[in-house]
Image (cartoon, rainbow, N blue to C red):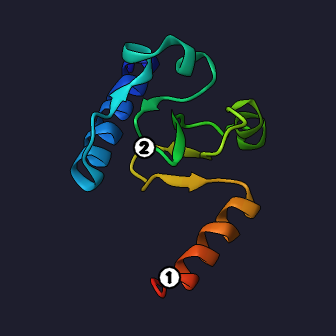
């Protein structure tokens, strides 16, 4: 039987490694590094300008509720959801997505 808690930890470690490899920095699991962030629904530290909540669940999750519970700061709140044998997806508020697209266009990075 799969231990869902261990599955979640593995997903957090995998995403921390991906973030470190792509962007560098001292990315750590917040359950290890910052109880305050962990309590606010942020799973990885040092991922500015993003707050990342990572979910490895087979059942549907309420992304809206998760986003609303995340910090109200200057970072973009993103929920990354993974199901078995499927590529993870990222969800964020439309206004944040449009702001990022606007920045890409303004900097000719589209």
**Where is residue 31, by image quadrant?**
top left
Quick check: 89 left or right of 70? left
Residue at the spot 60% in from the left edge and 16% down from the top edge: 39
Does residue 106 sit above or below 68 in this rendering? below
Tag of residue 107: 1
**Where is residue 66, by image quadrant?**
top right
> Which quadrant is home to the N terminus?
top left
Please state the horizontal and vertical placement of residue 18, each as a whole percent of the image.
Answer: 28, 47
Q: Residues within 10 Å of mark 1 (few under 14, many from 20)?
A: few
Q: Secondary structure at mark 2?
A: loop
Residue at the spot 57% in from the left edge and 83% down from the top edge: 106
Residue at the spot 52% in from the left edge and 55% down from the top edge: 89
Residue at the spot 54% in from the left edge and 21% down from the top edge: 37
Please state the horizontal and vertical placement of residue 44, each as a whole percent of the image.
Answer: 43, 32
Residue projecting furthest to the left: 21
Q: Secondary structure at mark 1?
A: loop
Quick check: 8 left or right of 65? left
Does residue 49 sit above or below 57 in this rendering? below
Quick check: 75 left or right of 95? left
Residue where numbered disc 2 is placed = 84
Image mark count? 2
Sequence-wise first label, 1 or 2: 2
- Between disc 1 and disc 2, the foreground one is 1
Q: Residues within 10 Å of mark 2 (few under 14, many from 20)?
A: few
User: Residue 67 versus residue 9: which sits nearer the camera?
Assistant: 67
**Where is residue 94, by image quadrant?**
bottom right
Please state the horizontal and vertical placement of residue 43, each as a whole percent of the image.
Answer: 48, 29
Q: CA distance from mark 1 to mark 2?
A: 37 Å
- Kindly check if marks 1 and 2 are in contact, taking CB atoms under 8 A apart as contact: no
Please state the horizontal and vertical placement of residue 68, each as a whole percent of the image.
Answer: 77, 36
């Amino acid at each position: 039987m799969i231990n869902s808690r261990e599955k979640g930890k593995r997903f957090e470690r995998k995403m921390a490694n991906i973030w470190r490899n792509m962007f560098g920095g001292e990315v750590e699991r917040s359950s290890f590094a910052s109880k305050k962030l962990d309590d606010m629904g942020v799973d990885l530290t040092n991922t500015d300008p993003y707050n990342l909540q990572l979910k490895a669940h087979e059942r549907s999750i309420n992304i809206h509720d998760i986003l609303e519970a995340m910090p109200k700061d200057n970072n973009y709140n993103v929920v990354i959801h993974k199901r078995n044998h499927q590529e993870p997806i990222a969800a964020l508020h439309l206004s944040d997505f449009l702001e990022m697209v606007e920045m890409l266009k303004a900097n000719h990075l589209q």
